[in-house]
Image (cartoon, grey):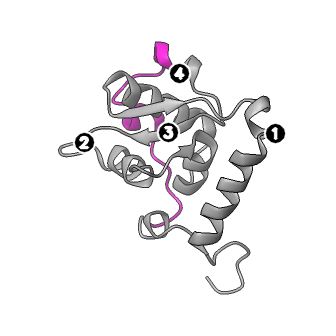
Amino acid sequence: MAGHPGAAGRDPAVTSRGRGRRPRLYAATGGRSSTARTSVLTMDTLITAAGDDQGLPSEWRAVLDLCRPPRALAVAELAARMGWRLTPMTRLLGVLLERGLIHHRLPLSPAETCNVVLLTRIRECLAKQL
């Protein structure tokens, strides 16, 4: 939609799905309302797809497609790109984690974010992508 703030630069995987209807939590998680693994997933936990998505529900495949290696996305970014709220996304990721379909890792520690060499490498990688 022209003139809509943020419409430019949207992820094609999200815009091709259509808008309006969000999947029900029950349907997206296969009937599971919580998992033991969701407690390790914070909004800044980085997610990378680990398994094959053949035969999986479309919402699951869409999430896995967004975070195929070498790309890792934060839980909050995945939720935003999918147009979901954070809680359903975290629950779905908990199911994917239990099934071995994703890997997760904590974001950088405060000590790592002050590492000048690391920050320089990140800047150089970002410059290459532009």
**Whole-Å distance between the Cαs marked 1 and 4?**
29 Å
- Local SS, label 1: loop
**Foreground disc of the pair 4, 3:** 3
**Residue bearing mark 3:** 47
Compared across the picture, whether 77 is left or right of 115 comes to: left
**Foreground disc of the pair 3, 1:** 1
**Residue bearing mark 2:** 56
- Pick whichever of labels 4 and 3 is earlier in the sequence: 4
- Pick whichever of labels 3 and 2 is earlier in the sequence: 3
- Local SS, label 4: helix
Q: Which residue ends up furthest to the left in the rendered image?
A: 55
User: Type of residue at label 1?
Assistant: Cys
Residue at the image point whose x is 53% and y is 21% from the top: 38
Q: Is residue 42 above or below residue 35?
A: below
User: Type of residue at label 2?
Assistant: Leu
Residue at the image point whose x is 81% and y is 39% from the top: 114
- Local SS, label 3: strand
- Pick whichever of labels 1 and 2 is earlier in the sequence: 2
The magenta segment: 18-38
